[in-house]
Amino acid sequence: MKKVFISSDHAGYRLKEQIKKKFSKKFIFEDLGTYDAKKSVNYPDYAHSLCKKVSKNHQNMGILVCGSGMGMSMAANKHKKIRAAVCYSVKNTKLSRLHNNANIITLGSRLTKKDTAFKCISVFFDTSFEGGRHKKRVKKI
């Protein structure tokens, strides 16, 4: 089974827990927090923690969940070797992997239905980078 790093803020906590349960037979999760939906936390702290783990190896991948997905993505994309994509549909998720070689999926728990989030995660981890003309573009990032 593939190891996947996962983290959320308080707004994404419930969806993070549902993801872990749904994909427990497919992935080994390393949960980097938060561990409570009631205590308000700062999403950048959790994004930075996950990115440090993902950036250590080019095969590492992660899942970040916050209210919109945007804050986590912005914080994550400040790190070298990280390409975090806000995913809200199967199509944009597939393209984030095919064309951008995203290594972190970010989800918005307040904007994305649970079933859509599950579909996006499946597509994200089942889609490989296309390479070719996209390789030089990703290298420029």
Image (spheres, helix red, strand yellow):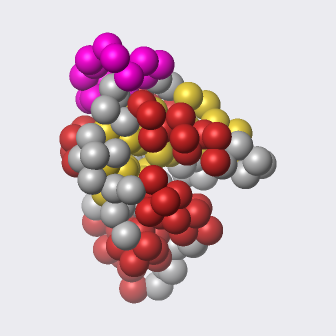
x, y (%) of residue 67? 27, 41
Q: Is residue 28 visible?
A: yes
Front-lying residue, 81 or 51: 51
Q: Does the stretch in magenta take in 9?
A: no
> Range of the magenta residues?
34-46
Q: Residue furthest bottom?
A: 133
Give the residue at x 28% y 19%: 41
The x and y percentages for residue 93 are: 41, 68
Residue 55 visible in image: no
The residue positioned 52% from the left and 73% from the top of the image is 129
Q: Is residue 72 above or below residue 104?
A: above
User: Residue 109 versus residue 43: which sits nearer the camera?
Assistant: 109
- Is 35 included in the stretch rendered in magenta? yes
Query: Residue 133 placed where, x, y %?
Result: 39, 85
Horizontal side of 9 relative to 22 (left or right) equals: left
- The kind of secondary structure the magenta stretch mainly shows is loop
Question: Hey, which quadrant is residue 127 in on the image?
Answer: bottom right
